[in-house]
Image: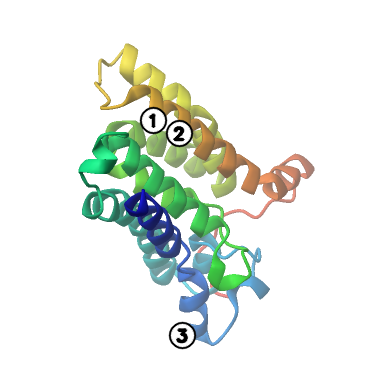
Amino acid sequence: MFNLVLIVLLSYLVGSIPTSIIVGKLVKGIDIRNYGSGNPGGTNVIRVVGLGWGIFVILFDAFKGYFATAFIAKWFYNQFLASMLNLTTVQIIAGCFAVVGHMWTVFAGFKGGKGVSTSAGMLLGIAPLDLLIAFLIFALIVSITRYVSLGSIVSAILFPFIIIFSENFLKIQHRDFKTLLIFGSIIAFLIVYRHRSNIKRLIAGNENKLSFGKK
């Protein structure tokens, strides 16, 4: 059980790395949370710091989820854990705690980002085809509306249904379908929950659209 606790703790700490805050301070000497939308995420870095740095933040935040899933879970997976949980389940648990770390980072007063990029990184090593479908939906919505939040919300809501669709109709054999569906649904709920202020702005018609200009 010590190894499972270690996996959870390390995954949370890796997920907690406040990439956007670090980039904002190193590149422009600012706290990104005081500019733009105030959200410490890649989209806000694009708005405030610039496109290149915003892409870097998005990719690094995704890497946090992937690292927890593909490396931390495997490094500390041992025979005792194998007698209780299969590797896929442990990977999903590690990835989820990386997402939780990103959303509620210990390094920034337990106030973090929305978790979309870290969730994508988590799913990259577990359900890449499902992630691709969700990303295409996200990209389509953002390209039409320029609302990153709307693309994130819709793709998160649809993700559990994508898993069901790919398993039953595309005949993609997930290594642990039920566990993936459960944790995928939990992550989807958390992403939508973290976007509740965006949902209010979308309804009110004053949500920020994606732009590439510096401020």
Coloring scheme used: rainbow
In this rendering, does residue 114 appear at all?
yes
Q: Callout 3, which amino acid? A: Leu
- In this view, the residue farthest toward the right is 204
Chain-order first, disc 3 or disc 2: 3
Position in image of residue 175 (x %, y %): 25, 27
Quarter of the image containing the C terminus? bottom right
In-front residue for pair 51/155: 155
Q: Along the horizontal axis of the image, is 103 left or right of 19?
A: right
Q: CA distance from mark 3 to mark 1?
A: 37 Å
Residue sitting at x 48%, y 49%: 116
Q: Quadrant of residue 32?
A: bottom right
- Label 2 SS: helix
Chain-order first, disc 3 or disc 1: 3
Residue sitting at x 52%, y 74%: 21
Given contact means CB atoms under 8 Å apart, are the residues at marks 1 and 2 in contact?
yes
Residue sitting at x 44%, y 60%: 15
Residue sitting at x 61%, y 40%: 192
Position in image of residue 36 (x %, y %): 64, 68
Give the total of numbered labels.
3
Q: Along the horizontal axis of the image, is 187 left or right of 72?
A: right
Q: How would you rate the neighbour count of disc 3 (Cα within 10 Å): few for under 14, some for 14-19, many for 20 or more?
A: few
The residue beneath circle 2 is 184
Q: CA distance from mark 1 to mark 2?
A: 6 Å
The residue beneath circle 3 is 26
In-front residue for pair 100/123: 100
Q: Tell us which disc is closer to us: 3 or 2.
A: 2
The residue beneath circle 1 is 180
